[in-house]
Structures are given as structure tokens and as C-alpha cells.
Image (spheres, helix red, strand yellow):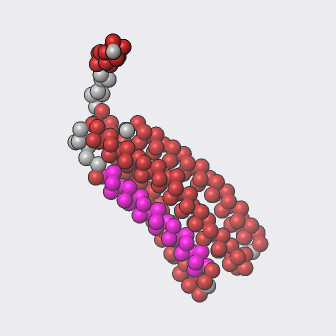
Amino acid sequence: MKTFDDLKSQWQEQALPETPKDGSKLVLKKIDFLQSKHRITNRVLLTTVLVLIGFFFYINAYKYMVVTVGLLLMIGTLLIRVSIEYFSIRNLKKLNVTKDAIAFKADMIAYYKARLKTHYIATPIIIFFYAVGFYLLLPSFKQSLSKGFYTYVWVSAIVLLFIIGFFIGREIKKELGILKKIT
């Protein structure tokens, strides 16, 4: 039993990590930054939704079933993502920073796990169905656009998918890094 008692005394003699002077301010600053990023994301997504809705009525998409389904898939996936971000902002605002450190950390870990699900499950599904919606529009584009412009739309969509995928990945990595530091 002597070894256990030695370990126990060594454990109790460890110096406690020093609490940063502005630790709570730093956490609040990072939470505000995350909320701001969520709001910007929602504004961009809602602007895209409005453009797609305008496009829907501009081309009279409701007359063509495939075009309607494609645009509704694109609009629907963006609205789902907006609602996910809205609830994420709401949950982030609900975090009580006046709680003791252990309880706050538990809340942050729960929030972090929810964001992991958003980024690694919901986001790929949303991107997939958005791409399916776009793919459904391609035959209509091919019929109504010149061959050169159709090729431009097709190629630029692929390039944009990779560029947007890169930026989404980078932003996810940043957000998860911030959340990891807070937790």
C-alpha cells in the first residue's frame, strides 16, 4: 500500500495550473466571434436562397417538374443549413458563462459535440443534396444555353464546389480549434 500512498501524496502536492487573469473575457470573446461567424454564414446562405427563389420565378421553374425539384432541393438544403446555424447560435447564447468551470466546460463539450455532428454529418449530406439539385438543373441548362455557356456553367460549378469545399473545410477546422481551446 505504500506505493499507492506515495502516488496519492504526489498527486495532492501537484501545483494547480494558474488561472489566466482574463480567462473569462477570452472565452466570451471567442464565443462572440463564433456567434458572429454563424450570423455571417446565415446571411450568405439566406442571400443565396433569395437569389435561387428569384431565379425560380424568373425562369418560371414551376412549369417544369425537374427544374422545380432541383431548385427546391437547393433552396431546401440551404434553409436546413440556416436553421441549423440559427439553433447553434441560440444554443451558444444559452451557455451560462457564470457557471463554475466544470459545469461550463461540460456545456461547451456538449456544444462542441453538436458542432461536430453538424460539420461531419449534416454538412456533407446538405452539400450532396444541393449538388443533386444542381445536377437536376443541368439538362434544362443544356437545352436553353449555348454549348459554350453550358460548358462554362458545368466547369465553374465543379471548380466552385472544390473551392467552397476547401473554404468550408478551413472554417470548420478553425471553429473546431476554437471550441477545443475553450473546452
Q: In this view, does 143 lie above or below 47?
A: below
Q: In this view, does 167 lie above or below 100?
A: below
Quadrant (top left, top right, bottom left, bottom right) of the C terminus: top left
Image: magenta residue range:
67-93
The answer, for residue 50, to whether it is visible in the render is yes
Q: Does the magenta stretch include residue 81?
A: yes
Residue 83 picture quarter: bottom left
Quadrant (top left, top right, bottom left, bottom right) of the N terminus: top left
Could you say which is closer to the camera, residue 51 or residue 65? 65
Residue shown at the point (33%, 54%) measured from the top left:
91
Left/right placement of residue 138 relative to residue 56 reads: right
Left/right placement of residue 57 relative to residue 112 reads: right
Q: Is residue 154 above or below residue 32?
A: below
Residue shown at the point (77%, 72%) measured from the top left:
147
Residue shown at the point (42%, 39%) measured from the top left:
180
Where does the image place residue 65, in percent across and percent down from the top left? 60, 83
Where does the image place residue 127, in percent across and percent down from the top left? 57, 61
Residue 131 picture quarter: bottom right
The answer, for residue 14, to whether it is visible in the render is no
Could you say which is closer to the camera, residue 151 or residue 174? 174
Main secondary structure found in the magenta portion? helix
Left/right placement of residue 149 relative to residue 162 reads: right
